[in-house]
Structure formats: C-alpha cells, structure tokens
Amino acid sequence: MSHEHQHENQQGSEEVIKILDLYETREKIYTRRLKGFFRDVRKYTLMPMMAAYFLLPWLNIDGRQAIWFDLPERKFHIFWLTFWPQDFMLLAWLLIICAFALFTVTVLVGRVWCGFSCPQTVWTLWFMYAEHVWEGDRNQRIKLDNAPWSANKVIRKTGKQVSWLLIAFVTGFTFVGYFNPIRDLTMGFLTFDAHPAAVFWTAFFAFMTYMNAGFLREQVCLYMCPYARFQSVMFDKDTMIVSYDPRRGEPRGARKKGQDHLEEGLGDCVDCSLCVQVCPTGIDIRDGIQYECINCGLCVDACDSVMDKMGYPRNLISFTTEHNLAGNKTEIFRPRFIGYALVLTVMVSLFLYTIASRIPLQVDIIRDRNLLYRETPEGFVENIYTLKINNMENVSHSYVIKAVGDYDFTYSGDRQVEVAGGEVYSLLVRLELDPGLLREPNAKVYFEVESVDDPSVSATQESRFIGPSRRY
C-alpha cells in the first residue's frame, strides 16, 4: 500500500514524500473488452505470430523439420539453411540487429513492440480471452470473484483453469518441438515413451507460460522486463506515444448528452474512467506519461467510443507527440532516428550479404602429431594428415581434393569423395617428397577442396610439410 506523509521543514514549507511498499499485495486488474481500431490491430497482429509459432515445427523441408535446433548434433536448421557452431557470430550479429531494430522503432513510435508483438502481451491476451469466455466481461468477473462459492462458480473457475493449462501445455510442447523433432515428440507423449528431459522441459515451459500469462501478467512488464526501465532514454519530444490532451479535456466531469459543456466550464473528458478500465497495466493515462504504458492503444479506442456518443471530436487520447500536444510541429527525420536507421540499414545489408555469400563448406587439416615425418622404404619423406570435410548444405556433394605447394608432392589417398548433406567426412591423406628436393625442413602445403557440381563451393586450408634438416 502506498502512503503519503507530509513533512514541514523549519521554513514552513511542505514536502510530500511518497513511500512505496515493495512487498505490497498485487491488486487484480479487471480489464474491460471494447471494440475498436487498435484492438483489431492487436488481434490481426497476434494471429499470424501464433500461427507461425505453432505451425512452423510441423513443416518439412528436404526430409527434415523446417526449423530444428539440433543441439546434440550442433546443427541449427532454419528453412533451407543449416548453421553450425562456427556460425555463432552470425547469431550474435542477428541479435544485435534485432536490438537496433527495437531501438529504431522505439525512437519513432514508442513501445509499440510491447503493446502489439511482445510474447508476454500475445500470450496474456490469449489467456484473457479464455477468461472472458468462461467468466464474462469485467463486471461479471468482479461479481463472480466477490460471490460465495457455488456450483456455477466452480464450473467457471475450473473451465478457465483447464483452458489455461491446455494453452500452457501446447505452448511448452511446441517450444520443445523446436529442439526435438516434434513428430517424434508427439509419438513419445502419446505412447508414454517420451524422453524424461523432453517431459521436464515441456512441463517447465508450460508452467512458466501458465504463471506469466495467467497470474503475473502486467507484473512482468512493470517489474521484470528491463526494456520498461531503459526505453525512456530513447524517447524524445517527437516520439509517438499514447497521450491525453489536458488542454482539451480539463476540467473533466460528468454531463448530459447534448449539454453545452463549455458553458458549464468543462472540458471534453466526461470522467467515465473507461480508459482506465481497458488498460492492461491498470494506469490512468490522464496522469501523464508513465513508464507502465505499453502503447497498446486500447484507451484510445475507449475514449473515441465515448467521444462518438457525446458528439465530440475524436483523439482526446491519441497516438501523438509531446510537440504536437504543445502545438508545435513534429520532426520525424531527426538526427537520433536517422542515426539508428542508418546503422540498422548497414548492419542488415552486411548480414544479408554474408548469408548470401556464405560458402557451405569447411575444411580442417590435422597433422599426425605423434610422428613429424617418416622415411619410406623407397627413401621418400612422408607426412600423414587427417582431412575433415564439413558439408554444411542439406544435399550431398562430390568433392575433388588437391594438395599444392612449392613442391610437387606425391598424393596418396582419395582424390574425390561423396559427402552427404550435413555430414563431416574424415579421410587419411599422405604426402611424399624426395628429401633431396627440400630446400628447408618446414614447407607450406595447401589442401584445396572443390565441389564437382558447383565450383564456387570450394575451400582451401593451409598446413605444413615437415622433413629432415639438411646438413652442410
């Protein structure tokens, strides 16, 4: 509970100190459902996201799951591409790009990610819809919670909890399906033969979904999400945010429809509190800019519906900027936004170029470290190498192998090999040379591997050829 204490200093002035109890009990928020433009936008934003999340693991490409993070094999399959541990920098790069994209969007239109696309928001909306189906709208839910336990209350509460648990289980099951082939996972659960690790992680993510979307809800946004804390540093007076126009709305107060409120000294705000009732974080937007606001726009829909009924102009609450509210012109192309946009464009372009020009072949050479060299019965010097060819594509390739350098080495081993898609192929290679030709005991040698069907797919790896030291 928040308490206000007044302290009078020696000069007689008064200072209001607000003390927040960090262990205060959460007050349950009962949100009202109202139709409107931004509610429709949220609905049509989350539907494709949910469909993609639940359907993508079931798609197959080239005989495998379209998106599959195969941790045991250290392969990350994303549609037609396969990434390996050595591609970790690409993942780090992608995360940085996502961060800069979020910064760019925030500078321009505030926290629209939080209001429309954040998984916490999307799943909370889904849980709230199930709650609405079983318990009704805001007033019905308040009445049901305050009512004594009865058969009707038990049925409704049980139905809601079962719906939540079902949604949570499907969510956790699908998430694990990105790391374990989802068809095998399904058969494992149906036959009660699933791996204990798969069962544990499914239960873990289902429980976290159930808690976050069912009970924590706005608490995640207010106290757990770091973005809510640092996003304000990216705001400026030209950032689009949900705002209330106090010059037009104040003084607020009730009035009859058709009454000239201006003659009564009232603003356009009828003080109906609908903007508070629809807010998922339970704030009053009329109190000014607050970090709890997630820019979902539901208060805009609520206020516009009241303005329509009263015959007043819309946008008493709207997506606008501080400059607009002050009567000044909003600058879209300002230095901060241009800087973020340029950096983002450069990073995305380089990332796409890297992906497009990425050669799906890696070659590693390992010399026999137990024996620097050996002399053959014919008197030649021989070095032994283990050649590893990593076919990073999902289709098989034939590769031609050559060893070149300052000397005309005699090559012993397979000169052409077939490597299946995603396979690491190892072969033993021997190089021989007449010791009389060696001008130095340590010479460079290059192993060249080239795809037969696509010469652009090739790789070269350097190694050393070691022989005896010449004595003069």
Image (cartoon, rainbow, N blue to C red):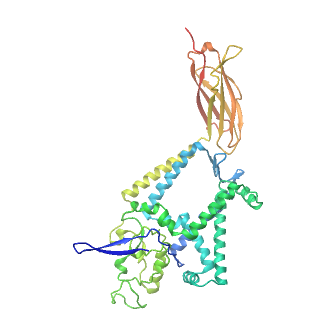
15 horizontally vs 55: left or right: left
Q: Quadrant of residue 403?
A: top right
Q: Is residue 59 visible?
A: no
Quarter of the image with the C terminus is: top right
Q: Quadrant of residue 22?
A: bottom left
- In the image, residue 447 sits, relative to residue 111, either above or below, namely above
Q: Nearer the viewer, residue 216 or 312?
A: 216
Residue farthest to the front, as pictured:
10
Q: Is residue 37 visible?
A: yes
Quarter of the image with the N terminus is: bottom left
- In the image, residue 17 sits, relative to residue 360, either above or below, namely below
Residue farthest to the right, as pictured:
191
Q: Look at 37% across and 76% down and name the residue there.
A: 245
Count of marks, rendered view: 0
Q: Quadrant of residue 121?
A: bottom right
Q: Position of residue 228 (x, y in %)?
A: 45, 63
- In the image, residue 139 sits, relative to residue 1, either above or below, namely below
Residue farthest to the top, as pictured:
472
Q: Nearer the viewer, residue 459 or 1?
A: 1
- In the image, residue 12 sits, relative to residue 152, either above or below, namely above
Q: Position of residue 198 (x, y in %)?
A: 68, 56
332 horizontally vs 428: left or right: left
Q: Position of residue 8 (x, y in %)?
A: 27, 74
Q: Position of residue 253 (x, y in %)?
A: 39, 86
